[in-house]
Image: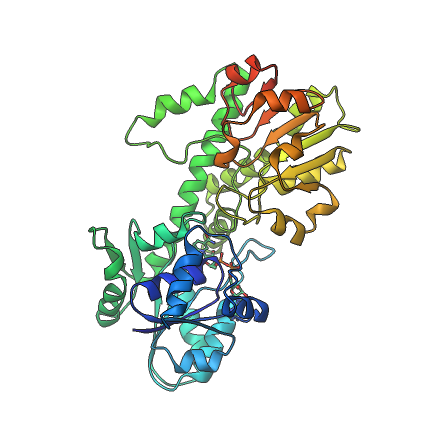
Amino acid sequence: MKLSVIGSGYVGLVAGTCFAEAGNHVICMDVDEKKIADLKNGIIPIYEPGLEAMLKRNVDHGKLTFTTDMKHTVHNSDIIFIAVGTPPDEDGSADLTYVLAVAKAIGQYMTHPKIVIDKSTVPVGTAALVKAEIQTQTDIDVHVVSNPEFLKEGAAIDDFMYPDRVVIGTDSDEVGETMRQLYAPFVRTGNPIIVMDIVSAELTKYAANSMLATKISFMNEMANLCHRVGADIENVRRGIASDRRIGKAFIFAGVGYGGSCFPKDVKALIHTSSKYDYNMRILTAVEDVNQDQKTILIPRILEHFGGSVKGKTIALWGLSFKPKTDDMREAPARVLIKTLHELGATLKAHDPVALEEARRLGLDKMVTLCEDNYEAIRNSDALILVTEWLEYREPDFEYMKKNMNSFAIFDGRNIYNPEKVRSKGFTYYGIGRQ
Ligand SMILES: NC(=O)c1ccc[n+]([C@@H]2O[C@H](COP(=O)([O-])OP(=O)(O)OC[C@H]3O[C@@H](n4cnc5c(N)ncnc54)[C@H](O)[C@@H]3O)[C@@H](O)[C@H]2O)c1
């Protein structure tokens, strides 16, 4: 099939590459000229395991091309995915400016009927808005489908190639069938393609992300209670994880969730519910808990240093909002760096892949960015583990002991064994741990 993907970010680039891998001819379009020029030169603008090799293979086979030319994109595709950003507006609602700009441009250049697919995460009613926007420009028939994306950054290629499910929202049986054919190569193991009405599909994505965010904030509240009553959240977690109704995934306490999706999608769902005169009390609490959680370690750090971090050097391991990505949108590390910098601490930080992104965000004005994680702890008075990258899990405590000024570890993801860390001569602080 002749496809195009408009918006070549985390979602668009992965989706476009995977569709090409499945045998389709795909045009990835973006307004960002540098991004497209880089892609044409084989430079991948994001860190995503497995993407580079797959992308280059499909470019070499002539199945994947890149352009900034919208007219060329629309003329040369029958199925058009919209995968542009939907950032939060000031009131928390999803900003549809980019989605609707794309819709208008599609309408301008359409010369024959198309299927247009909302892959961006968009609120209830957006497919209808997209259709209306296209039809301000043309009378040619267009079907607008909702096809939310569930990939996780860091595992995006696997998630796209082997999805747990594909959700399709459409009001046309024929279009539903075309979508089934498009996704058939990705579900050969029998995972479902769930075809439903458009509004339910739009809401499904928000329900999924809000449920996951709820699990995290619930565990963080439990951790905060553990801290007060002298229990250990890791024991509590193990105790509940074996209940199949609860499950093992996504019940780790920590310094809060970040990223481009959970924070904005929780806010957007709260906004949608208020628009329909309903107050989603649970989600308001999920959001509040997460905001507080990002600074949960600050009082403990201050207490450890007798009330002030002035003159102290603090190392941070991990800047991205989660491992295996360079994405720092809404990352807890950003809040911690800003807060500790304002409190007068000297900061050093390492991340395996996000240093460039940290520089782009101007964080190097507040923190020295180190190429090596041991360089970050050298002459430091404490370490904060912010992102649970695999390479931080078994550090060389002997080396750290020799090279740090004083020996405190604030484990923002509960990845260390407190007894082991203490036996190495460090003071250990976790999240909700004894
Ligand atoms: N990142 C994720 O893990 C993830 C997962 C599932 C769903 N989503 C959703 O997918 C959407 C895209 O997210 P992302 O993380 O890929 O965003 P992103 O910021 O990485 O990429 C968006 C791209 O769209 C481009 N763009 C903006 N306006 C454009 C226009 N008018 N024409 C062409 N290109 C344009 C931007 O230049 C950018 O390259 C969002 O709605 C997001 O919520 C993201």
Q: Quadrant of the N terminus?
A: bottom left
Residue at point 34%, 85% (across, down): 112
Please name the colour scheme applied to the rendered image. rainbow
Residue that appears at 49% across and 61% down: 9
| Visible residue check, residue 263 | yes
Q: Is residue 10 above or below residue 340?
A: below
Residue 143 position in % (x across, y down): 33, 74
Name of the residue lying farthest toward the right: 311
Q: Quadrant of residue 51?
A: bottom left
Residue found 54% across the figure and 25% down from its top: 431
- Give 190 or 396, whichever is nearer the viewer: 396
Residue 15 in percent (x, y) is at 39, 61
Residue 121: in sight, yes or no? no
The percent position of residue 91, horizontal first and vertical second, equals 58, 54
Quadrant of residue 161 within the rendered picture:
bottom left
Vertical placement of residue 325 versus 59, above or below: above
At a point 52% along the width and 73% down the height, the residue shown is 101
Q: Residue 222's x, y, as percent? A: 47, 25
Instruction: Name the residue nearer the viewer: 66 or 293.
Output: 66
Which of 143/124 is in front? 143
Q: Please determine whether, in this image, residue 271 is positioned above or below residue 68.
A: above
Number of disc labels: 0
